[in-house]
Image (cartoon, rainbow, N blue to C red):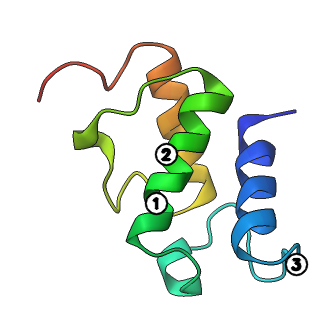
Amino acid sequence: MTPQKLITDYIVEVWMDGDADGLEPDTPIDELNIIDSAGVFDLVHFLQQEFRITVPLRQISLANFRSVNAISDLVGRLQTGEGTASA
C-alpha cells in the first residue's frame, strides 16, 4: 500500500467516520475542518510509527500538512533523509 493510501485511510478512519467524501489527495485538510492542533500530533505519531521516521518539530507546519499529497511528500523526504538537517 502506498504512503498516500495509508495516510488517506488513517484520516478517513480517525476524523471522517469512514466517509472519504470530499477528501482528495490535494484537498486542503484545514478547509475540511476535521483535524485540530492536537489531532496534528496524533497524525505525526501515526506517521512516525507507520513509516518508522522521525518528524522534526520544525517540519510540523501548515505547508507540510496541508493535504494528503503534502504529508506523503514529507514522509518521502524524511525516509530518504531529506528535511532532517537543521534549517
At label 1, counting other C-alpha atoms closer than 10 Å, the crowd grade (few under 14, some 14-19, many 20 or more) is some
The one nearer the camera, 56 or 82, is 56
Callout 3 secondary element: loop
Q: What residue type is labelled 2?
A: Val
Per the image, the residue denoted by label 2 is: 44
Q: Quadrant of residue 32?
A: bottom right
Callout 2 secondary element: helix
Residue 81 place in picture, x, y as percent:
40, 13
How much space separates mark 1 and mark 3, taking CA atoms? 19 Å
Residue 42 place in picture, x, y as percent:
53, 54
Q: Can see residue 29?
A: yes
Quarter of the image that includes the C terminus: top left
Residue 48 place in picture, x, y as percent:
54, 31
Image position of 76 with respect to 5: above or below: above
Horizontal arrangement in the rendering, residue 72 relative to residue 57 (left or right): right
Horizontal arrangement in the rendering, residue 33 relative to residue 68 (left or right): left
Per the image, the residue denoted by label 1 is: 40
Residue 19: which disc?
Answer: 3
Residue at x 50%, y 22% (from the top left corner): 53
At label 3, counting other C-alpha atoms closer than 10 Å, the crowd grade (few under 14, some 14-19, many 20 or more) is few
Q: Can see residue 66?
A: no
At label 2, counting other C-alpha atoms closer than 10 Å, the crowd grade (few under 14, some 14-19, many 20 or more) is many
Image position of 41 with respect to 76: above or below: below
Horizontal arrangement in the rendering, residue 51 relative to residue 3 (left or right): left
- Mark with earlier residue (1, 3): 3
Residue at x 88%, y 78% (from the top left corner): 19
Q: Are marks 2 and 1 in contact (CB under 8 Å)?
A: yes
Q: Which of marks 1 and 3 is in front?
A: 1
Residue 2 place in picture, x, y as percent:
80, 34
Horizontal arrangement in the rendering, residue 26 relative to residue 83 (left or right): right
